[in-house]
Image (cartoon, rainbow, N blue to C red):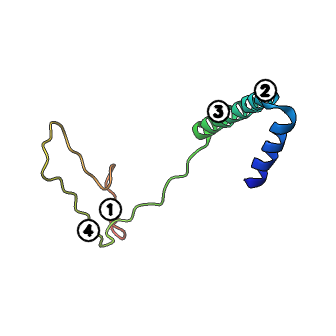
Amino acid sequence: MAVTAVWMGIYFARVGLNAASQAAGVVGAFIGLAGLAVAVYGAMAAKTEPREPGPPQRSGTGDVVTNTVSKTTNNGTIIQGGRIGPAEPPAGDS
């Protein structure tokens, strides 16, 4: 970081502030274009890459989950669920 600051100070002193400002504008434009390209690539890759499913949920592990809503005024539906989807029989029951 300090080396870059020293290098920039020497560069500004040699070429003058006008030329340095023009060079910074050109460099900034190229950096902006590179950032835009990386952002577009990332957005496209996120849409096209298949996602791996998460680890399977085990039922009957002895864990207890308690969902509570208190001291609130609600004007709509509250849905709480640890698992959304068809129920699976416990391991060993088939």
Q: Amino acid at mark 4?
A: Val
Where does label 3 land, which residue?
A: 40
Name the element at disc 2: helix
Q: CA distance from mark 2 to mark 1?
A: 74 Å
Where does label 2 land, which residue?
A: 18
Where does label 1 land, which residue?
A: 89
Q: CA distance from mark 4 to mark 2?
A: 68 Å
The part of the image, by quadrant, that contains residue 31 is top right
Q: CA distance from mark 3 to mark 1?
A: 44 Å
Q: Amino acid at mark 2?
A: Asn
Q: CA distance from mark 3 to mark 4?
A: 44 Å
- Tell me the residue at 62%/34% (across/down): 44
Q: CA distance from mark 3 to mark 2?
A: 33 Å
- Tell me the residue at 69%/32% (across/down): 32
Residue 46 screen position, x and y as percent: 59, 40
Q: Amino acid at mark 1?
A: Pro
Q: Would you say the residues marked 4 and 1 are in contact, meaning their CB atoms lie under 8 Å apart?
A: no
Q: Reading the chain from its start, which is encountered first: label 4 or label 1?
A: 4
